[in-house]
Image: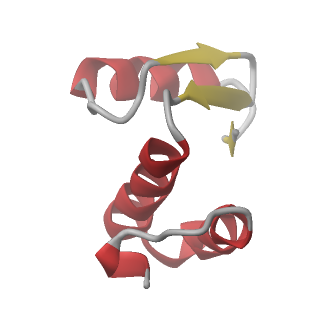
Amino acid sequence: MLRTTIGAAQSVAAAIDKAEWPEVVGTISGDDTIFLATDTGRAQAQIVAKMVREFGPFFIKMAQVAAATADFLPDEMA
């Protein structure tokens, strides 16, 4: 799940879809929330790592939450 500013979720989800990240199976967006579907836990960890690289410290907390439920991490998050 991603949070955006009010009214931005559809545009952000469209940009993620257009980027065709292989880790993302699809997106569902509301007004300020996006659900990113992945097909594996590893893909979920990889997309979180990618967002941390792309968007910086804002996603660190999300990465920590994802890491707490995974028994593996991509190299850049280990």
Residue 40, image x, y percentages = 50, 36
The correct choice, above or below, for 4 with respect to 48 in the image is above
- For the N terminus, the quadrant is top right
| Any part of residue 8 in sight | no
Q: Is residue 16 above or below residue 5?
A: above
Who is closer to the viewer here, 64 or 74? 74
Q: Is residue 53 above or below residue 31?
A: below
Judged from this view, the residue extending furthest toward the bottom is 78
Is residue 21 shown to the viewer in this render?
A: yes
Name the residue: 25% across, 24% down. Answer: 20
**Left or right position of 12 against 53:** right
Residue at 66 percent of width and 41 percent of height:
4
* Residue drawn 51% across the image and 30% down it: 38
Figure quadrant of residue 75:
bottom left
Viewer-closest of 40 and 25: 40
Is 37 displayed left or right of 43 in the figure?
right
Residue 22 placement (x, y as % from top left): 27, 31
- Residue 37 position in % (x across, y down): 56, 25
Q: Where in the figure is residue 8, as x and y percent of width and height?
A: 60, 28
- Residue 70 as seen in the image, left or right of residue 46: right
Q: How is the image coloured?
A: secondary structure
Q: Residue at x 67, y 74 (%)?
A: 64
